[in-house]
Image (cartoon, grey):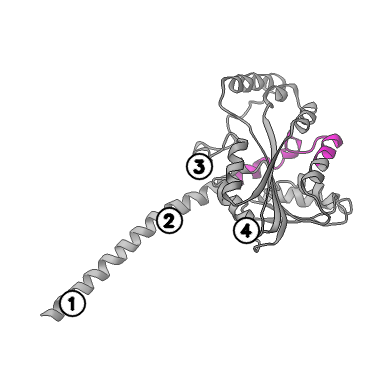
Amino acid sequence: MKFSRMIMFLVLWGLICPGLLHGQEQQNAPASANQDRIKEEISKRWDISSDKYDSRPGHGVQSEEEAEAWRELFRKLMVGNGLRILDAGCGTGEMSFLLAELGHEVYGLDISKNMLAKAEEKAKTKAGSAGGRPIRFQWGDAENPPFEPGFFDVVFCRHVLWTLPSPQTALDSWTKILKDNGKIVVIDALWDDGSLSTRVRRKVGGWLRYVFEKENLPKSHYSPAVEAALPHAGGVPLDKARAYMQQAGLQDLQDTKLDRLGDIQRQHMPFWYRVIYKNAYYAICGHKRSQ
């Protein structure tokens, strides 16, 4: 009798447990699948943008004066010769090429294959002009870069944090692939603070764009679903970037306002874009100190 009850118990347990486990898998699967869909849409969005990316003010480097301002900033923030640098979310490689010109060993990583194709195309025309150092471009997710711990002297990103569903995951991952005393350099801005003045500027700028270029200003870079998944769809405030870096264990944090760079960029923008382009543009960096 006892043996029969034991058999019955084992049979019921075998029926119930797989159901419980299956239920758990189903709960986890949608979250993972949703993340994959978000990343896929982000990739497609920048694939579409790749054709005109370099011509857009604030994205492509529009003048030698701007290029030199970037070089000056990099010399200040990344002290040393021949540093191994990851350009996370490198896009078409605009910053990668400037860093290579300074003699650094640069790896460019991006989730958009079309952006990388543009970078590779430009690399062919820039052969021999990038400080004698070829740039290694490869596809990958900036939140989880495929590199071994302690591989880089510097991890650099420009206009990337705001595009990420999990900026903290990115900072944690970047810290892991840094050498001891390595450095993370983040360049970003608060593009849209939601204030009345910002909304008015965007309305006026959008109207001027339509008048002169017959093109509407897009309401958003992404679909509502993706925007809802991004904690900083309107840009990353400096204090938030600082908090992510502190949480990742970085030390000696320093920030720099990029007002001069912004002024140089505005000189080469259409009037309607200058109306909109008034952001708190900054660079912030921190060190991974040995324990």
Residue type of the residue flagged with mark 4: Lys
Q: Which of the two discs, 4 and 3, sits closer to the camera?
A: 4
The residue sitting at the left extreme is 1
Instruction: Report the residue marked by disc 4.
Output: 176
Start and end of the magenta stretch? Answer: 43-70
Specify which label sits upstream in the sequence, 1 or 3.
Answer: 1
In the figure, 281 relative to 22: above or below? above
Q: Which mark is residue 229?
A: 3
Instruction: Find the distance from the CA under tag 4 to the CA under tag 1.
Output: 51 Å
Horizontal side of residue 275 vs 236, given as left or right: right
Specify which label sits upstream in the sequence, 1 or 2.
Answer: 1
Tell me the quarter of the image containing the C terminus: bottom right
Q: Which of the two discs, 4 and 1, sits closer to the camera?
A: 4
Residue type of the residue flagged with mark 2: Ala
Q: Which of the two discs, 3 and 2, sits closer to the camera?
A: 3
Q: Residues within 10 Å of mark 3 (few under 14, many from 20)?
A: some
